[in-house]
Amino acid sequence: MKTVWGSICVLAFAVTLACSHIPTGKGAGEVESSSQANTSFRVETVVSGLQVPWSIVWAPDGRMIFTERVGRVRVVENGKLREQPLFTVPDVEPSGESGLMSVVLHPQFATNHFIYLSYAYGGGGVRVRVVRYTEKPEGFTDRKVIIENIPAAQFHAGCRLRFGPDGKLYITTGDATQRQLGQQLDSIAGKTLRLNDDGSVPNDNPFVNQQNARPEIWSYGHRNSQGLDWQPGSNLMFQTEHGPSGFDGPGGGDEVNIVEKGKNYGWPVIHHKATAAGMESPLLEYTPAVAPASGMFYRGSAFPQFKGNFFFGCLRGERIIRVVLDGRRVVSQEDLLLSKYGRIRDVAEGPDGYLYFSTSNRDGRGSPANDDDRIIRLVPVK
């Protein structure tokens, strides 16, 4: 009974913190709607003046923790942005599309305080590593490298982290602009990786006992996936992936894939709507390009019409795309906030059930407003 009551108290505390004293800025109070879902929402700026916020999570105590690509881990607590970062990555390489990318908390963060970061680093070329820290009152301690030497470049560096329903850590990697690496099982570029929380390899990974194959690999043939989540009920993994761009193929061809154990998703042999034996074609394909940069299923109750829908932010497409699904089948799609807030990167569900998203207008490709970059939320209008 004490455990249940403690969980209720933590949840109530999280919602209270997330809802209180939220600062507003440009865009605050604007009302938008989803015509397909017949629901309206108010757009509120949560925090502004940021530098390319890449990834957003919430701690059990209600704090919003997010990364900025330049290497800072920031926190919003009691509704206010703490001036000093929680942590600054000392060896981050922030050029091009690289830098500090994803943050994820261990499923048992409330007790072990493990926090994971993925970031690009230099020294003999750009690479990506995933590092685990322990958050303590004095700061981030007990640095442990989970995996490193992931091939990267200024472009196509990945790298999204999420814990799956099985408790394993999943990592998306880009092809490092070397397209052939996506098909090479002796490279971890252009892959989905699956690891235990300490960086060891699960013995049921698909290529554990295959010669000349990296045992960390879960799926392959990816160009640059930056969003993943698991569909409630089915536990199917959905990923968003950037398609070819000019120098490495015809434009467009952005994808949403259902990613499964050991399967080959085709890049660079097939892309767009092409098919080939032994390779998976995308569930959804977007030409012209929208540049999908995230992915999440909505599980909350604040927007009951969105329950089970898949959302992802678009950089070039400057919108959030909402996908209604029936298992593996796409029922409908809808554009939200089209061309309203510029380049949209992460989309995340807060403990209040509201939808939060980050802009990426200071990434060198956008047209930033005076208060960009921002984290913004959608609040239902009753």
Image (tube, helix red, strand yellow):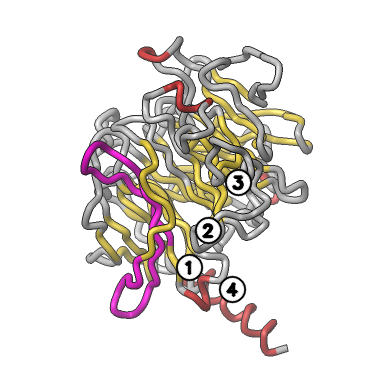
Mark toward the start of the polypeptide (4 vs 3)? 4
Asked whether residue 255 is in view, the answer is yes
Q: Which residues are magenta?
A: 116-143
Mark toward the start of the polypeptide (1 vs 2)? 1
Between label 4 and label 1, give the one nearer the viewer. 1
Secondary structure under badge 3?
A: strand
Q: CA distance from mark 1 to mark 3?
A: 18 Å
- Can you identify the residue that label 2 sits on? 200
Q: Residue furthest bottom?
A: 2
Between label 1 and label 3, give the one nearer the viewer. 3
List x then y, in percent, for residue 183.
53, 25
Name the residue: 45% across, 69% down: 114
For the residue marked with disc 1, what is the amino acid? Ala
Q: Is residue 150 left or right of residue 350?
A: left
- Can you identify the residue that label 3 sits on? 229
Mark toward the start of the polypeptide (4 vs 1)? 4
Q: Is residue 118 left or right of residue 268?
A: left
For the residue marked with disc 3, what is the amino acid? Asp
Above or below residue 283? Residue 26 is below
List x then y, in percent, for residue 33.
57, 38
Name the residue: 35% across, 53% down: 67
Secondary structure under badge 4?
A: helix
Specify few, some or many for label 3: CA neighbours under 10 Å numbering under 14, 14-19, or 20 or more: many
- Can you identify the residue that label 4 sits on? 11
Q: CA distance from mark 2 to mark 4?
A: 32 Å
Contact between marks 4 and 3 (CB within 8 A): the answer is no
Based on the picture, tell me whether residue 355 belongs to the magenta stretch: no
Mark toward the start of the polypeptide (2 vs 4)? 4
Q: CA distance from mark 4 to mark 3?
A: 22 Å
- Can you identify the residue that label 1 sits on? 59
